[in-house]
Amino acid sequence: MRPWGVALEDAERIQWGFAPFVGVGPLRFGMSHEEVVGALAVDHAAVMVPGSWADFHLPTSHGPALRTYYAGVDRLHGIAVDALHGPQVAMDGLRLVGQVPSKLAALFVDYVVSKGLRDDVYFSQEGDPGADELGVVLRAQRAGDILLTRPVLVAREWADRVYDTSEGPIPDEEWRVHA
């Protein structure tokens, strides 16, 4: 078992893809919590706050790998991927998890501009880049003495101001995760 605060190497991580507003790996936005549990092939959530969020451990993780957020009638609307223990999530080859925030921010801006979405990169009050048109905010999470990226990926219904920590759709619980 890895010590607390030590991140998995990319080779140790499950590899997933992200399709904006569709889903991440085996998860699809709009799934029920029970469907999420089935898609992840786990017995249950490690921690669950009914109707709000759930944390999941995956076979390769040494801690919580994912936090799923639910809205409406318990439908999946957001997925936060843990910087230390989560799967590696790629969007058109751009690796989003466990990266140095300043390096990934530059690559992310270039990616968004290359998609013709120049005016759609915003920064949260904490300095994290995000894009409404992709439903992504690239948060920073502590890994010992360094910061690594913790992407939060959302359904279209939550995309407006995805980066906004005070008025955006992402639940307050997510903005309090720092380690």
Image: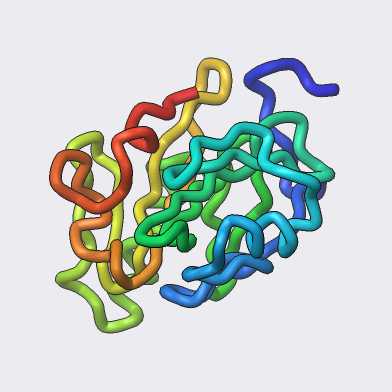
- The residue lying at 44 percent from left, 47 percent from top is 51
- The residue lying at 53 percent from left, 65 percent from top is 94
Q: Is residue 120 left or right of residue 49?
A: left
- The residue lying at 63 percent from left, 20 percent from top is 5
Query: Which x, y percent locates residue 47?
Result: 61, 32
Task: Tell me the quadrant of the picture where the N terminus can be found.
Answer: top right
Q: Is residue 65 visible?
A: yes
Q: Nearer the viewer, residue 143 or 71?
A: 71
| Residue 99 figure quarter | top right
Q: Nearer the viewer, residue 32 or 131?
A: 32
Q: Nearer the viewer, residue 61 or 72?
A: 72
Query: Which x, y percent locates residue 57?
Result: 72, 39
Number of numbered markers: 0
Query: Which x, y percent locates residue 125?
Result: 18, 38
The coloring applied to the image is rainbow
Q: Nearer the viewer, residue 125 or 66?
A: 66
Q: Is residue 153 visible?
A: no
Query: Which x, y percent locates residue 117?
Result: 24, 77
Q: Is residue 25 left or right of residue 122?
A: right
| Residue 52 figure quarter | top left
- The residue lying at 16 percent from left, 40 percent from top is 166
